[in-house]
Image (spheres, rainbow, N blue to C red):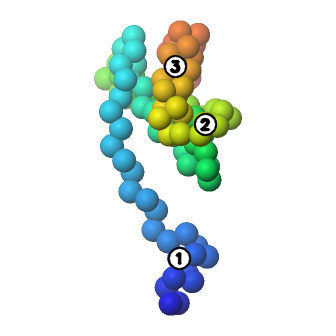
Amino acid sequence: MFSKLVKSLFGGAEKPAMKVEPVEYKGYLIYAEPKDEGSQYRLAGRICKEINGELKTHLFIRSDLFPSKEDASQWMVRKAELFIDQTGDHMFQ
């Protein structure tokens, strides 16, 4: 009973990360990783690319909220593609 109280106060152990299959777009890898925001999901993920033998990562989080994880994932990919088209490798600077 005491451990339940401690977990509720301090959050307990973190949820294990789920394996996400990336979407390849123009040499970039897009990982859709929506964030649970109560009853909605925030558009979030990573954009990665190998440059000169080094893996570069850009965290991509937006204010958009969606009713389902699937919707948030689909829109993450769409918005990440647009972001890639607009900024290219400059996102890693």
Q: Earlier in the sequence, mark 3 or mark 1?
A: 1
Which kind of residue does numbered mark 1 sit on? Lys
- Check disc 3 and report the residue beneath it: 78
Number of marks in picture: 3
Q: Quadrant of residue 42?
A: top right
Give the alpha-carbon distance from disc 2 to disc 1, as whole Å: 28 Å
- Check disc 1 and report the residue beneath it: 7
Residue 27 picture location, percent across and down? 36, 14
The secondary structure type at the circle numbered 1 is helix
The quadrant of the image that shows the C terminus is top right
Residue 23 picture location, percent across and down? 37, 23
The secondary structure type at the circle numbered 2 is strand
Q: Badge 2 local density, few (<14 within 10 Å), some, or many (20+)?
A: some
Give the alpha-carbon distance from disc 2 to disc 3, as whole Å: 14 Å
In front: label 2 or label 1: 2
Q: Earlier in the sequence, mark 2 or mark 1?
A: 1
Instruction: Say whether marks 2 and 1 touch (CB < 8 Å).
Output: no
Which kind of residue does numbered mark 3 sit on? Arg
Please state which of residues 78 and 31 is positioned toward the viewer in this rendering. Answer: 78
Please state which of residues 39 and 53 is positioned toward the viewer in this rendering. Answer: 39
In front: label 2 or label 3: 2
Q: Is residue 1 left or right of residue 29?
A: right
Q: Earlier in the sequence, mark 2 or mark 3?
A: 2
- Residue located at (31% from left, 23% from top): 53
Which label number is shown at residue 66? 2
